[in-house]
Amino acid sequence: MTDDQWFREAVVYQIYPRSFQDTDGDGIGDVPGIIDRLDYLHTLGIDVLWLSPIYRSPQDDNGYDISDYEDVDPTFGSLADVDRLIEQAHAPGIRIVMDLVVNHTSDEHPWFVESRSSRDNPKRDWYWWRPARHGHEAGTPGAEPTNWQASFSGPAWELDETTGEYYLHLFSRKQPDLNWENPQVREAVYAMMRWWLDRGVDGFRMDVINMISKHVGPDGSLQDGRPIAGTVLGDGTPFYICGPRIHEFLQEMHREVFDGRSQKYLTVGEMPMVTVEEALLFTDPARHEVDMVFQFEHVDLDHGEHKWDRKPLDLRDLKASFGRWQEDLADIGWNSLYWNNHDQPRAVSRFGSDAPEHRVASAKLLGSVLHLHRGTPYVYQGEELGMTNVPFAGPQDFQDIESVNYYRTAIEAGADPEWVLHNLRLGSRDNARSPMQWDASANAGFTTGTPWARVNPNYPEINAEAAVADDASVFHHYRRLIELRRSEPAVAHGHFTMLAPEHRTLYAFMRTFEGTELLVLANFSADELAVTGDDVPRLDRWSGADLLLGNLADDPSSVVEPLRPWEARILRRTT
Ligand code: GLC
């Protein structure tokens, strides 16, 4: 491994600053709060911090709508605070990665304010402006230039009365899409990225970066997508996911921003709907695009027709998906590994069990399984405590724009409110955004004010102070997993082999590296599970193996005895 591949041995911790730690009593987390918790993060052992956006923003999508890329929103602190954070994180060797949101800006960004001011403004072409559909009057139903649905419900086009044209927004109407076809846009983005690198940050997590290239016809036209059942809208994704110039744009970005610098920065592309074949191109080091992609296949497996149509997860599908990504990126390219982030419900409630008797074991099991795959693991704040989904009482409890818009449009379309609420409880991003649970004091130690989002009522039991004090906690299990990555080369570098792909509750795989074999056995159920020679070939060879890390209080008498409910064992033998 060369130095510029350091990320292969690293663990990333994601902070959602709004919900991490408040220090000024306004009920919203801030950068000084992150600085205050660096010791905690250092104890956990992580290498990289990725911060969700802290830039100036009207907060329509909690900071993913940016109005000034080169300043910090006063809610979160100041540039001086960020400088302090970089310096204090770097001291023990923790790198800082910023969120880069450049598929769109806020509609309050000066670029867009100028762009919308007149049809002949020099920045008009920095965004996607189109007249009403041919033969339709602007502002009438169906007059949008294409039928695309926005990710946050409703049409992806908004009419701007000033000039009588529509602008494209793949997310909220306050997030207009930048036009990457325009070289001035690209140059402005690259200049901003260089400005952050010069300030000392160590890389970027690139928000929905595979949406920046749109399919444009020779005459500048965009096309309608396949109709979406039950709506008048269509699916535009084939026209903007991994579009025709995406690789060119990322290579250009690499040249303009990273080439010629002595440091090796981290670049992670968040890429909805990316295929493994595309990911191979994006992450082939020889192509100079990004180090890894953040893909969604495994977190979409419990969706039916769409995100709000939830179905139970079949473990065989999960293994098939992970297995294929492991295999296809084995020789070239690299995986990122995650269960959680600020857009996903809590993993222990979704893939494990948040029932009191199983929560700790299943949270640890999920950690063991994920961290032992090949790739760079991401820990989302609170995952290391086994934080759970929030018990939302009713629709009024949801704040996220995606959830609020979904509720409104589903009810308007005649859906049963109980069913909509059920889907929200399972799938809402608000589940991940409740405040970090630090201790058993008021508001879980997150704020002395009124928290912007309700603290999960289970905080007196589930909190960092209690977890750090308890050697058998989820926290210490994660700490051990991170340590294992450093002490055992097979974890970062071993070859991966999936076992028992058709088993409904056993997740089993092997890692092999220079005479070391690791076997991971995980029971994804509340029933005892006997592992047999059909599941793990030549199981007898493992009877004398070392138990590197288990997840239950008492070790099994033999490493191959039946797995207890939600038990996960990591075994090691030398060949
Ligand atoms: C990404 C972010 C998500 C945001 C969206 C639009 O998916 O992770 O939180 O809403 O992009 O920026």
Image (spheres, helix red, strand yellow):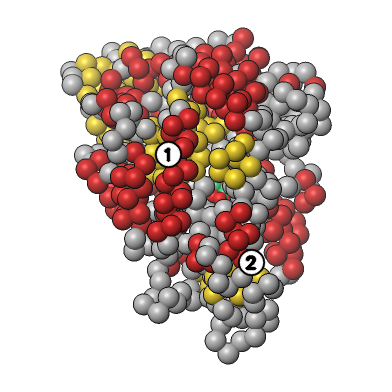
**Total marks drawn?**
2
Which residue is disc 1 drawn over?
Answer: 194
Q: Residue 418, percent across and down?
A: 75, 56
User: Residue at horizontal 65%, vertical 85%?
Assistant: 137
Nearer to us in this view, 132 or 12? 132
Q: Secondary structure at mark 1?
A: helix
User: Residue at horizontal 31%, vertical 17%?
Assistant: 488
Q: Amino acid at mark 2?
A: Ser
Nearer to us in this view, 438 or 113? 113
Task: Name the quarter where the C terminus is drawn.
Answer: top left
User: Residue at horizontal 74%, vertical 47%?
Assistant: 398
Q: Is residue 25 left or right of residue 501?
A: right
Above or below, 99 against 357 in this view is below
Q: Residue 73, percent across and down?
A: 66, 38
Whether residue 23 appears in this view of the structure is: yes
Which residue is disc 2 drawn over?
Answer: 117
Q: Secondary structure at mark 2?
A: helix
User: Residue at horizontal 61%, vertical 25%?
Assistant: 81
